[in-house]
């Protein structure tokens, strides 16, 4: 990611999430509200220095609802923090089961974008167009971020957690429900690593991990995961999926979200040996 501007601050413009106030995600990154309603199309297009950026700006400027404010003492550090903020966007997507796009970078905050602004596309993949309305964070969800986001960031050191987050944040990028199921279950299975009696062991691990102190809920979760795993197997192997496959996609996504949340709260990934001795 190339840093635009020459100062000690840059902004990544986001869509898919809306926040009521500034939220500190780290020493260098804040998630803050954004408003581009003042920006007309001609001005937005005129400040694009590269032709390919025009299409991205035209698609996403009207959708901008939040932004990362990134600060650092040197351009090298600023570039690193800006690049790594893509994982912050993926984390937010996974935690709140939304689709946070991070396709634009500016050297001024959203409400100050003008003909003097340096505005560029961070990528040309057009991810983030499938969600019609942004996820509006409640005060309770803001509190959750303030309490747990640093723990979520710390877990990104673990490849299994990275995979789970990326799977939940990106499964919408695919149009076919079967592919969505494959992506989601790559994240779910990857958190546990069961290699034998997969359907039974995975269902048992998940149920015990999510509901260690509630036998009735644990049993219900065990049965649900077994059914979802059957749908996953049919989807991945090209067989007919029983029932509504879209409902299976949604239930699988919710399951992966629960697993990610519990890992963040526990500050640790699930350990299969502890769950199934």
Image (tube, helix red, strand yellow):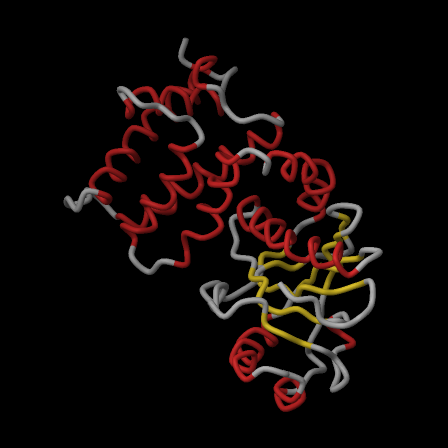
Task: Identify the residue shown where x is 76% and y is 74%.
Answer: 111
Residue in view at x 45 percent, y 64 percent: 130
Against 201, residue 91 (above or below) is below
Q: Is residue 136 left or right of residue 20?
A: left
Q: Quadrant of residue 50?
A: bottom right
236 relative position to 213: left or right: left
Position above or below: 190 against 24: above
Comparing 88 with 97, the one in front is: 88
Q: Is residue 40 above or below residue 121?
A: below
Q: Quadrant of the C terminus?
A: top left
Residue at image coords 67%, 34%: 151
The residue lying at 27 percent from left, 50 percent from top is 178
134 vs 117, nearest the viewer: 117
Q: Is residue 254 above or below residue 127?
A: above
Q: Given the current orientation, which residue lies at the most extreme front position? A: 76
Q: Quadrant of the N terminus?
A: bottom right
How far across and how far down the image is residue 176, in percent? 29, 57
**Quadrant of residue 47 within the rendered picture:** bottom right
Q: Is residue 201 left or right of residue 41?
A: left
Residue 175 lies, in percent from the top left, at: 33, 60
Relative to residue 202, is residue 274 drawn left or right? Answer: right
């Amino acid at each position: 990611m190339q840093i635009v501007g020459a100062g000690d601050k840059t902004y990544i413009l986001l869509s898919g999430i809306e926040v009521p106030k500034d939220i500190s995600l780290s020493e260098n990154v804040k998630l803050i509200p954004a408003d581009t309603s003042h920006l007309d199309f001609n001005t937005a297009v005129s400040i694009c220095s590269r032709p390919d950026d025009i299409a991205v700006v035209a698609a996403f400027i009207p959708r901008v609802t939040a932004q990362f404010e990134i600060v650092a003492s040197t351009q090298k550090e600023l570039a690193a923090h800006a690049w790594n903020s893509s994982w912050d966007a993926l984390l937010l997507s996974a935690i709140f089961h939304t689709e946070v796009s991070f396709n634009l970078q500016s050297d001024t905050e959203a409400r100050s974008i003008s003909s003097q602004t340096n505005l560029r596309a961070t990528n040309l993949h057009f991810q983030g167009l499938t969600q019609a309305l942004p996820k509006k964070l409640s005060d309770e969800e803001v509190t959750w971020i303030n309490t747990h986001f640093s723990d979520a960031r710390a877990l990104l050191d673990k490849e299994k957690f990275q995979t789970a987050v990326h799977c939940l944040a990106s499964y919408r990028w695919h149009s076919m429900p079967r592919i969505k199921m494959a992506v989601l279950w790559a994240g779910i299975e990857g958190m546990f690593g069961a290699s034998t009696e997969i359907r039974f062991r995975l269902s048992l691990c998940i149920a015990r991990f999510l509901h260690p102190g509630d036998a009735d809920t644990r049993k219900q979760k065990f049965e649900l995961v077994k059914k979802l795993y059957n749908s996953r197997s049919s989807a991945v192997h090209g067989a007919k999926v029983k029932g509504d496959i879209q409902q299976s996609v949604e239930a699988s996504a919710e399951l992966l979200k629960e697993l990610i949340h519990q890992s963040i709260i526990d500050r640790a990934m699930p350990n299969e040996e502890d769950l199934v001795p």
